[in-house]
Structure formats: C-alpha cells, structure tokens
Image (spheres, grey):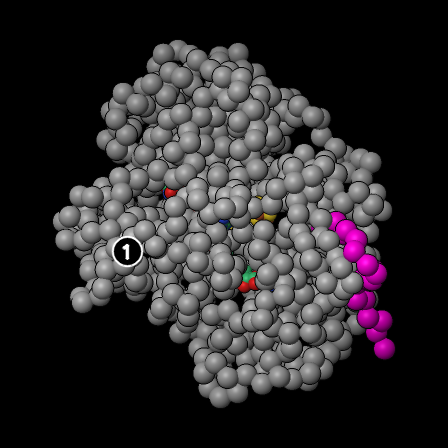
Amino acid sequence: MIERHLPLVETGTRHQVHGACPLDCPDGCSWEVTVDGDRAVALAGRKDHPYTRGVLCAKVNHYLDQVYAEDRLLYPLRRLGPKGSGRFERVTWDRALSEIAERLTAIRDDYGGEAIWPYQGTGNLGYIQGLQGKAGSRLWNALGASEHAMTICSIAGQVGIDYATGTSAGIDPESLRASRLIILWGVNTLTSSHHLWRSITRARNHGARVVAIDPVATRTARLADEHIAPIPGSDGALAMGLLHVVVAGDRHDRDYLDRHTVGWPAFRRRILDFTVADAARISGVPAAAIIALGERIADTRPTAIRAGIGLQRHAGGGSVLRLLACIPAVTGDWQHHGGGLAYSTDGYLGVDREVLARTDLRPRPVRSLAMTRLADTLLHVQDPPVRALIVYGANPVVSAPDQENVRAALSRADLLTVVIDHFRTDTADLADYILPATMQPEHLDVHDGYGQMYVAWNEPAVPPRGECLPNSEIFRRLAEHLNLSDPCLYDSDEAMIEQMFATDHPSLAGITPESLRATGWARLSYPEEFVPFAHGFPTPSGRFEFHSERARRDGHDPLPGYVGAREVTDADRARRYPLSLIAAAPHYLLNSTFANNATLSTRQGAQTLSMHPDDAEARGLVGGSRVRVFNDRGGFDAVVTVTTAVRAGVVGTTKGQWRKLAGDSTVNATVDERDADMGGGAVFHDNRVQVCAIPDAPEVNPDITTQPEKDRGESDS
Ligand SMILES: Nc1nc2c(c(=O)[nH]1)N[C@H]1C(S)=C(S)[C@@H](COP(=O)(O)OP(=O)(O)OC[C@H]3O[C@@H](n4cnc5c(=O)[nH]c(N)nc54)[C@H](O)[C@@H]3O)O[C@H]1N2
Ligand SMILES: Nc1nc2c(c(=O)[nH]1)N[C@H]1C(S)=C(S)[C@@H](COP(=O)(O)OP(=O)(O)OC[C@H]3O[C@@H](n4cnc5c(=O)[nH]c(N)nc54)[C@H](O)[C@@H]3O)O[C@H]1N2
Ligand code: SF4
Ligand SMILES: [Mo]
C-alpha cells in the first residue's frame, strides 16, 4: 500500500497561515489566510512583502468566494449520455481513477504513449501543483506521453529576446524606480500587474516620464504622461524608427557597443536604411512623435522598457521583442540600474526544475504538441492520433484559438477527456471524467512571480472541501492505478520541494525549504540594485548579439528587424474584415478564472466592443448597440462602446468570458490557430473581424455594461 501524502493541516481557533497567489500574473503576491476552526475567513496581502505590500487585487480579493462557492466541484464525476450533454454522475475516486487508468493503458498498448496528451494550462503557476514545476510531468514521462508545449502565452517574445541576450529574463521590474524614462510597451500594467505601479510612481516622484505604447488608451495609457497608439503589430517598425533617430543623431553609445555587442556595423546599416518616414507609414504614428520619443530615448539615462505579453501576440511577436532588447544595447542602458528591458523574470529562481520534471523517465524521445494547436492536432494529427487528453489548470474551450474547432475536436466520441478543475468550465462540460482539485488554501506549494524577484511558500491552511485532492496527489494515485513502479512517482510534496531546492544556485543563498516555510517569502539572493548584464550576456559570444548565429541556425534573419503582423497587414482580408480586434486582459477576471464569480463578472460587465466613432457611424451603431463580431472562423456577440480610446480600424475587447455564460461563443471563435514567427507563439491580437448590428436586438444602456471605473466602493487595483 502506498503511503498517502495529504497536506497536514493545523486545526484550532483563529490563526493566520501564509501563502501565495497561484494565478498567472507577474506579481506573484504573498498572502495571509485567516482561519477560524477549519474555515478560511479572510485573505489579505502580506503587509511585510516588499512587492505585495498588503494589497492583493480586484480579482483575488474575491478568491475565498471561489473556495466556498456553491458551484465548486467536490466529487469526481463521470459522463452520462453523449459527450457535451452536460449530464454527469458522481463516482468514487477509486472508480474514476481505475477506469481512467484502464483506458490509458489500452490507449498506450494500441497507439503508444504519445497518444496521451497532458494538457496543462496556466490556472496554477506553482512548482508542485502547477505550471512552473510542470506538475504531473513525472507521470507523463514515465508513460511516454506527448510533451505539452506551452505556446499560449509569452513564448514568442522569450525566444526573440533570448537570441539577443542569451536569456529571456530581463531586468528586475522593481529597478524601474531608478529609471528616468519608462516606456510601457504593449502592457496594461494597471490591469495585468498593478503592483509594478509603485516602482513607476517612485520614479515619477523623481521626475521620470512615463510613455505608454498601445493601440488602445487603456487605464494605464490614460495615466501615462504620453500615449502613442500604433497600428497593432507594427511596433517593430516603430522601434526601428526610434533607433533611427538615436543613430542618425549619432547619439548611440559607441563605447558600450564596442565592448559589449556583436554585429553592430550590420545592424547599424539596417537602422539607417529604415527611415522615420517608413516607421510612420507602417505604424500610423506621426513622424514628429517618433522623432520626439527617439530624442527623448537618446537623451535619457537610464531608460527602461517594460514590454507586455500582449505586444507579442502577433505574427512578428518574436522579432518585435528581439528589437526592443536592442534599444538598451544601442543606448548602453543595459549597464545602468533602471535601464534595460523588463519582460519576464522567469528563470531567476534557480531551483532544479529537471528533478521535478524527470524527462529521463521517458522510454524514448517523444513528440511535442503545441497548446495553441489543440483543434488541429485533435482533428488531424495521426501517427499516433491523440486518444487521451488530460486537461488541468486549463480551460481551452475559452482560452485557446479557433473555438469552434476546439469544441468539435473535444466532442470526438473516441477521445478520452479528463478535466481536473475547480469548476464545471466550458471545457469540463465536454469531458468524460471531471476530477475535483484543491484550491490554494488547501494544498502545499512553492511559487515565484514572473514580474518580481521573490520566492514564496504556500502552506495548506484548511482541509480540502468535499473530496478535492491536490493535482500532485491525483497524479500519485493515478500512477498507483497504472501500476507504475518508479519510486519518484510517489514522492510527497515536501520531498519534491526538498529535491528542487537541493542545488547550490546562488539565487538561493540563505533560502531553504525550512526557512521559507517559516517566513513565507524571501527575496532571491540578487543585489538590491541588480544590473543583470553589467558584466556581459549569457550568449555564445558573451556579448549582446545583434547578429545571432543561433537565430540563423533556427531559420531566422541573423539580424533583428521589423516583421509585420499577418492578418492586420493583409489587404485582401482587410476588405472583408476591416477591423483589427484586440482581446486583452480583463480587469476583473484572470483569463477565464473568476468568470463564474457573480461579483466579479458583474463588475467586468457584458462583453463590450470598444469602437472608434468613425467605425461606429459607418455601421449605424451607437453606444449600447448589440452587435455580432465575426470572421470566417466564427463570431461572438458584444455590446458596443463608442470611444476614441481605440484608433479607427481597431476594435478592443477582453478575453476570458465563459461561453456558456456569455451566449453561444466568445472571442476565440474568431482567432486563428496560427503561429507567430518564433517559438510557435499564439497570435490572439493579429485578428481581423467585421462587425454588424444584430437585427431587432434591443440597445443596452452602455452605462450598465461597464460600471464607472472609480466608483465601486472598494480598492480598484
Ligand atoms: N486582470 C488581469 N490580469 C492579468 C490577466 C488577466 O486576464 N486579467 N492575465 C494574465 C496573463 S496570463 C498575462 S499573459 C498577462 C497579460 O497582460 P499584458 O502583458 O498586459 O497583455 P495583454 O492584456 O494581452 O495586452 C496588453 C496590452 O497590449 C496591447 N496590445 C495589443 N496588441 C498590441 C500591439 O500590437 N502593439 C502594442 N504596442 N500593444 C498591443 C493591448 O491593447 C493591451 O492593452 O496578464 C496577466 N494578468
Ligand atoms: N483572445 C485571447 N485569448 C487568450 C489570451 C488573449 O490575450 N486573448 N491570452 C492567453 C493567455 S496569455 C493565457 S496564459 C491563456 C490562459 O488560458 P488557460 O491556461 O486555459 O487559463 P484559464 O482560462 O484561467 O483556465 C485555468 C483553469 O485552471 C483551473 N485551475 C486553477 N488552479 C488549478 C489547480 O490547482 N488545479 C487544477 N486542476 N485546475 C486549476 C481554473 O479553475 C481554470 O478553469 O489564455 C490565452 N487566451
Ligand atoms: S495581483 Fe496578481 S499575483 Fe497579486 S493577488 Fe492579484 S492575481 Fe494574484
Ligand atoms: Mo498568459
């Protein structure tokens, strides 16, 4: 009999237990759960945490509502009736897991392990229960399952930056406090990572200027000193124009370029050949604004660029981040605290990830399946076909591109689909088995954040509701039902944490599992004024690589340059679908998480579509008009907001709403399953649509679709 490793839970009267937010957010907050008896009664940001500073966010303030929600999954369920009928029956864990194990074994015998696709999303970023540690990897590797490629979020930009700097981990975002010019490029900081605003405010108090570059006047852009609104996907041209201003004015840092970079002469020629007029024509940004910002960049040390993930969801997404990394190399900003590019800090926590993943357990090399090619892979890939899909921490019916085909693919009668989640999501509706997972106060985990430099411990605070189990425990039990013998498949959560910390990586100096468990959080062991590339770059040459042999070998241009969007720039498509749609982060939801929360979904309001007055007038639309937003892939309904916050030709909405709560379909019904230039990244914002009124639909009072931004009686961060 295998020992069960359920988390230990203290019981007693009111006490505090420290933990961390598990969600896919750069801020990686540390929190404190107040427990009364065996119930979590309050959740607050850790006051002593230098990044969280006692404040969570508008979403996670409602996290405990979700823990105790009536619609929370509490027991394993098995499908009754045809797929998608929505009828399930309660079964025991043993029954569910033994039937799943039997099906997986048969599939593996008939088609090989690669017919199994473990489809892990971003619902939990933990090292034990979530994505950072690729929870479940050991089991999937022992089975020889296909590898799951995380292409849905930030990969294109990571690959692009890596060609130039040798890593995708940029500067410490908190170093922005020392910046004199901050460029928030394709990021809606106040919605998607609001804790950074403190560092920005500190810089501003010392005279720094903040420029937002976004096709949409977001709440972040509105609070910046200057807003530049390029055509979506044209940022590479804008970056080249800015570089042209710096270099043509002979304001580049020759000394830095000589000592720390390779390929400068060729890249310099490319910059000089790309004129400000080219940049203005392609980006739609007036030449005067490009010249003014280029001169400001030339004049201001240190300048920091905070690039968002939204920026790279286009065909040229890798190339544009590669170009943004070049700006601080040309100006020499990489050598200054407060200068350089901040994109992700993923990688600074130097734990041993391989000991968690254990790819050595694979019986043979396996194929990799891209998360963003779910429909195509399930419908068309053979050799072997995918016969089992195990979905956890993900809601692909909502979040993946090509929604109509994702639904069709998940409706395949011959596909075994297991969904492990907290709620009956749109994806769970199409499952054969739904398994209930614990939520953050109910399990053990370790976290970092991809926009800060801390590590955090999440101690289980309360017993799991119903029969919920941690992902890690579900995988241990499944391994047992599969009769797998490798002892590492049965390691406890604590044992895995010990293993991942058993490294002498300098970032962990002074940090042990025991010390972390005691304190709840620690700053990684990097200098307070951290300048990551002060002494060189982790590239093959040890320098910043304008010219990259690795890029050339991977089939890319060896030099950085502008690569345009695909649909946005397609003239033929533009005739049929004249509007470029951006579906960015919603303020009150986190991806599709919280869409079933009554308070937050009310605050988020109906699916709105922001449209420029000219585009609205041309279609006879007014604020509150109900419209269909569509292209040849599918469509969704929305309520129009007429606003100059978007430029003409661009419409804006948000991701994340559940299909079954929003109507028949949501934004990703219009998005193509297509790769960006690098890393197979997704292209959510490189999407053309048409919009028409829904005949006879009553107008909706636009004031009730989204509540006024500042009048909600609670902190709106
Ligand atoms: N409240 C909330 N917070 C979140 C999330 C959420 O859903 N809700 N999601 C989390 C996740 S998973 C991620 S990856 C991050 C994402 O957060 P961000 O990095 O902020 O990314 P997005 O919201 O997709 O897009 C950011 C901005 O980029 C703009 N944009 C789109 N296309 C272009 C372009 O071509 N050029 C320029 N310059 N700008 C462009 C959009 O208009 C948008 O305002 O946020 C995380 N935080
Ligand atoms: N149109 C458009 N689409 C987008 C984007 C966009 O900008 N525009 N952004 C994309 C981005 S950046 C991302 S990251 C993806 C995110 O897409 P997904 O990875 O699918 O994330 P969510 O939609 O939040 O779904 C996460 C699910 O995990 C569940 N979950 C949370 N914690 C746990 C746990 O501990 N165990 C288990 N088993 N389940 C858990 C939650 O309840 C939720 O149902 O969406 C992408 N989709
Ligand atoms: S800001 Fe981000 S990390 Fe912090 S509580 Fe909210 S979602 Fe979690
Ligand atoms: Mo993401």
Circle 1 crowding by C-alpha within 10 Å: few under 14, some 14–19, many from 20: few
Residue 437 picture location, percent across and down: 65, 68
Query: What residue did someone put label 1 on?
Result: 701
Q: Is residue 358 at all visible to an observer of this figure? A: no
Residue 174 picture location, percent across and down: 60, 30
* Residue type at the position of mark 1: Asn
Q: Is residue 300 above or below residue 277?
A: above
- In percent of the image, x 74 and y 73: which residue is there? 477
- In percent of the image, x 50 and y 22: which residue is there? 204
Q: Is residue 324 above or below residue 314?
A: above
- Magenta span: helix, strand or loop, mainly? loop
Q: Is residue 680 left or right of residue 98?
A: left
Quadrant for residue 601, please give it.
bottom left
Helix, strand or loop at mark 1? loop
- In front here: 379 or 29? 29
Q: Is residue 563 above or below residue 356?
A: above
Q: Is residue 90 at all visible to an observer of this figure? A: yes
Please state the extent of the stretch shown in magenta in the rendering. Answer: 1-19
Quadrant for residue 71, please give it.
bottom right
- In percent of the image, x 53 and y 72: which residue is there? 424
Q: Residue furthest bottom?
A: 81
Is residue 522 highlighted in magenta? no
- In percent of the image, x 58 and y 51: which residue is there? 61
Residue 612 picture location, percent across and down: 23, 43
Ligand 1 neighbours mark 1 (CB distance < 8 Å): no
- In front here: 115 or 633? 633
